[in-house]
Amino acid sequence: MGFAIAIDGPAGAGKSTIARGAAKKLGFIYVDTGAMYRTIALGLLRMGVDCSDEAALAKALDQITVSIGYSGGEQQMMLGEENVTGLIRTEEVSRMASISSAVPMVREKLLQMQRDLAAAHNVIMDGRDIGTRILPDAPLKIYLTASIEARAQRRFKEMTEKGTACTIEEIRADIEERDLRDMNREIAPLRQAEDAVLVDSSDMTIAEVTSRITGLARERMQQ
Ligand code: DC
């Protein structure tokens, strides 16, 4: 079993940026579990599956193969033989990932794959249920959050820099909708594990949050 850092929190709290940076500093592997849900979501969208149709969903999941690779330290998502890393960040995929990740069958498909990665490597794994369900014994758990306003501003900046037309109101509404769904679903809802360290990044820089987490990791590794 490697040393595992579990980072959970809502959309836009900066989990992936922070986890990627901290992983580099610590020499750990960064596992973005949201990307795995997004990859399944892309597969389901392409197959035109309605998530409320259990039989169709089960059939589609049997045909969808998700795997993960690393290129230059960056996680690459494979859907079958296709590298879909660049295709899973659209709003359409975000919405489908939020809907399909609430379905138990979808979560089961990814659970063992996530645990196997943590068993084989030192990992920083981010998602919604890493500290509560996937790696309940992780020696360091972080619950990374930020105000809705701060998260909406960050996402807006990211989107406009990419040249995507959007308004701050649309983005805020979208984040609120995803928070509500991620926190209120029956299976593996987003919540802070009892033994997680709460980090609110609203007024912190990326460097500050990263060094807080690497500091905590180094402390715990010596224990
Ligand atoms: O972190 P993200 O935005 O890339 O995640 C995409 C969706 O997947 C999000 O709506 C929540 C879901 N998700 C999840 O349910 N469990 C995880 N461990 C990671 C993501």
Image (cartoon, grey):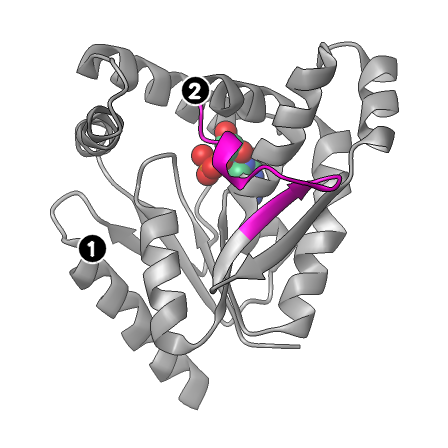
Residue 126: image tag: none
Q: Residues within 10 Å of mark 2 (few under 14, many from 20)?
A: few
Q: Residue at x 40, y 43 (%)?
A: 9
Q: Nearer the viewer, residue 131 or 168?
A: 168
Quarter of the image where the C terminus is located: bottom left
Q: Secondary structure at mark 2?
A: helix
From this view, report whether residue 33 is shown above or below residue 117.
Answer: above
Residue ID for mark 1: 206
From this view, report whether residue 162 is shown above or below residue 16.
Answer: above
User: What stretch of residues is rendered in magenta?
Assistant: 76-90
Question: Does 80 appear in magenta?
Answer: yes
Cα–Cα span, label 2 and label 1 = 24 Å
Q: Secondary structure at mark 1?
A: helix
Question: Does 12 appear in magenta?
Answer: no
Rendered location of residue 222, percent (x, y): 42, 90
Rendered location of residue 149, percent (x, y): 18, 27
Residue 91: image tag: 2
Q: Quadrant of residue 160?
A: top left
Residue 195 visible: yes
Q: Residue at x 53, y 41 (%)?
A: 85
Q: Residue at x 14, y 52 (%)?
A: 204
Q: Which of pointers 2 and 1 indicates the residue nearer the eye? A: 2
Residue 153 relative to residue 218: left or right: left
Three-letter code, disc 2 = Glu
